[in-house]
Image (spheres, helix red, strand yellow):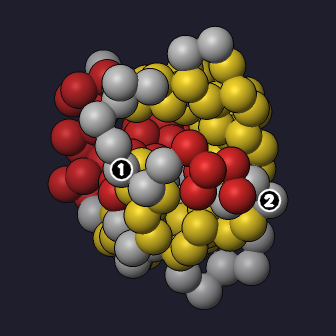
Amino acid sequence: MRVLNNSKEVAAAAGTELGVSEWISITQDRIDQFAEATGDHQWIHVDPEKAAAGPFGTTIAHGYLTLSLLPFFAAHVFAFAGEGAKINYGINKVRFMSPVPVDSKLRARIEMVEVTDIPKGQRAILRYTIEIDGVEKPACVAESVVLLLAS
């Protein structure tokens, strides 16, 4: 895991790959739990029998389930050290490029795209390229914005 210990190390990481996460399995149970949490029970996600006859031949993960894994991936790749608050400021851009079939494995390649000084600290833009094991095209590419506030 890469640890960025201070604002100078964060700034120096701009334009570099921070690392690649471990694989995580996308089981039907995980998909069903996400459907319960969000109220999104579309058959393409939660009805294996109907989905078998659908466009992907099986159930697929919700796009937002894939997106919700960003904190999991980050926790296995890098950390911002220090006492200051780390605040999720939002998402600049998200594209869901490939469906994630049930029982797929996902991992993320994380790049520090840009770091900008702000009055109370730094704003970091991180690009997550979420890969599906054995599939060339990524499942998702997302740019996350984090505020790193000085303590």
Q: Residue at x 42, y 40 (%)?
A: 68
- Choose between 61 and 130: the one closer to the eye: 130
Q: Quadrant of the C terminus?
A: top left
- Choose between 102 and 97: the one closer to the eye: 97
Q: Earlier in the sequence, mark 2 or mark 1?
A: 2
Q: Position of residue 71 (x, y in %)?
A: 38, 46
The tag on residue 93 is: none
Q: Residue at x 64, y 29 (%)?
A: 123
Distance (Cα) linking label 2 and label 1: 19 Å
Kindly identify which residue carries mark 2: 15
Assess whether mark 1 and mark 2 are in contact (beta carbons under 8 angstroms): no
29 is higher (above) or lower (below) than 88: below
Residue 2 appears in which quarter of the rendering? bottom left
- Choose between 43 and 94: the one closer to the eye: 94
Q: Position of residue 137 (x, y in %)?
A: 76, 70
Q: Residue at x 72, y 40 (%)?
A: 115
Q: Residue at x 67, y 59 (%)?
A: 13
Point out the residue furthest to the top here: 119
Kindly identify which residue carries mark 1: 81
Q: Position of residue 148 (x, y in %)?
A: 49, 30
Assign a secondary structure to mark 1.
loop
